[in-house]
Amino acid sequence: MPAENPHIWDGVVVGAGHNGLVAAAYLARAGRSVVVCERRPIVGGACVTEELIPGIRTSSGAYSLSLLRPEIWKELELQRRGLEVIPKDPQLFIPLPEGGSLLLWRDERKTLEGLRRFSAGEADGYERFSRFWDRAIPFLRSVLLSDAPPLEQLRTHAQRSGLGEIFRLAVEASAAEVVESFFSTDALRGAFVAQGIIGTAAPPREPGTAYVMAHHLLGSIGGIDGTWGYVRGGMGSVTQTIARVATEAGALIRTNSPIGEILPGEGVRLENGEVLRARAVLSNADPKRTFLTLLPSGAIDEATRKAIGAIDTRGSVVKVNLALSELPDYGAMPGSEVGPQHRGTVEICPSIDYLERAWAQASDGHIADEPFMEVFCGSAVDDSLAPPGIHVLSCFAQYAPQVDAETWPDLRERAGDAVVSTLGRYAPNVPGAIIAREVLGPPDLEARFGLTGGNIFHGEIVPGAIFGERPVRGWGGGPRTPVPGLYICGAGAHPGGGVMGAPGRNAAMAVLADLAAEEASLQRRTLPG
């Protein structure tokens, strides 16, 4: 067994996902000693760029950027360090099953012009939909970088602010109720309702899925709220840049260094037996892995153990990464050269009922015949990902059936086939153009990225598991835990998942405050008299 390292770190971070790296960067820039331990040979967690086949790279996990907090952009000087985001424009390309298509642009006036040609009523609905979120989102953003109150307190605050009905519809309603309040056609309802089930093992009519939609509108690109963009070089550029900030400030990042055990009040023990002493441990692992696997038996009481065990970590996503020998040629907007149909998100969800059918099939343990999917062609705007003439598609699909790791291999390729065949109905050339394919279902996401159950948010982001109830009720909605010296800095902490960075920043701020308070207390005790 390796000898114990006598050095005592101010902080040790479990996992080099984006939140762990954000936490390390803030600690190091504040002059604190910090070491990050990552089990994989690369940093980034699920926010990475990896080779699909030699010479062709893709964002294998997270695939688009919007939620990364502007405070982090500014404070860590990410733009100055070369991190570049290319806004998607159009934001959405919606091919219609009966022919034709809709384009939703960053410029609302341009979007409304197209919608009026489709339906004057839907254009009016889109304006009302946008104004609704203009009121809801600033209120929800106000608690992202602080400890959040429980849901009922936030609801009361909204009611006193004259936002009671807006809060209900944006947080507690179903995604279906939201879209049905503004739109009357299947095309618009389907396109927007899907945003309420992203990464969530719930059907669109389940109460609380409205917040999933709201959560995905909390970000901005180029000053335009709710918009998304491609990261040049793939999503790994985000974590590589943040890692440079951390190391330049003095943080040590150790890859191939899996944590074997968290030692409450002491630090961590690596799987190789090495002990790293630290005043604070910040876990970027999900709460179930943190508290039920990495902590020793007896470190938490039975009530806490049951509460953590009850966190819903069902995975619902099938991610299919493709390399193609040519661009997708969509029947709704044909073209072999890069056009608007390739630069935005291709949204395939023709109706609420379509999504409900996919949910029902997955709930019965089957592969959905026609999955919902979002399709991104990163190579259409970023030539660094693949050689000329080759294109990479990132297909994010739902729903995955709830099966164990032993059963999934028999279903994996069938899930990939369902995604490809469904996409092929809209772009018939795609199935014959595939030169490489990777299918990642929930068990694969757990094995590769350490996501318990394959849940991309470290646990559902619905009422009962957000704000002051995240990760569990009674902890105060912040990164501090009942275990001495242990903080949660990953997506399992408030405000939740997505490449946001807020949980990592919140944890770093809590650690800095607690270390300063501890040092001030020690100084007072040692002063003469």
Image (cartoon, helix red, strand yellow):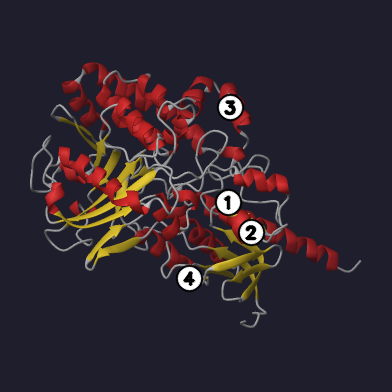
Between the residue at mark 4 and the residue at mark 3, the CA separation in whole angstroms equals 41 Å
Name the amino acid, label 2. Answer: Leu
Secondary structure of the residue carrying tag 4 is helix
Q: Do labels 3 and 2 touch, CB within 8 Å?
A: no
Name the amino acid, label 3. Answer: Arg
Please name the residue shown 23% across and 68% down the image: 54
Name the amino acid, label 4. Answer: Thr
**Residue sitting nearer the eye, 300 or 50:** 300
- Where does label 1 land, which residue? 287
Between the residue at mark 2 and the residue at mark 4, the CA separation in whole angstroms equals 18 Å
Q: Do labels 2 and 1 touch, CB within 8 Å?
A: no
Q: Which tag, 2 or 4, sits closer to the chain's start?
A: 4
Secondary structure of the residue carrying tag 1 is helix
- Where does label 4 land, which residue? 247
Q: Which tag, 1 or 4, sits closer to the chain's start?
A: 4
Q: Quadrant of residue 241?
A: bottom left
Secondary structure of the residue carrying tag 3 is helix
- Where does label 3 land, which residue? 155
Please name the residue shown 22% across and 17% down the image: 120
Q: Position of residue 167 (x, y in %)?
A: 51, 26
Secondary structure of the residue carrying tag 2 is helix
The mark lying in front, picked from 1 and 3, is 1
Image side of residue 526 versus residue 7, left or right: right
Near mark 3 (Cα within 10 A), the count class, few <14, some 14-19 or many ≥20, is some
Between the residue at mark 1 and the residue at mark 4, the CA separation in whole angstroms equals 26 Å
Q: Position of residue 407 (x, y in %)?
A: 40, 50
Near mark 1 (Cα within 10 A), the count class, few <14, some 14-19 or many ≥20, is many
Q: Which tag, 3 or 2, sits closer to the chain's start?
A: 3
Q: Which tag, 4 or 3, sits closer to the chain's start?
A: 3
- Where does label 2 land, which residue? 512
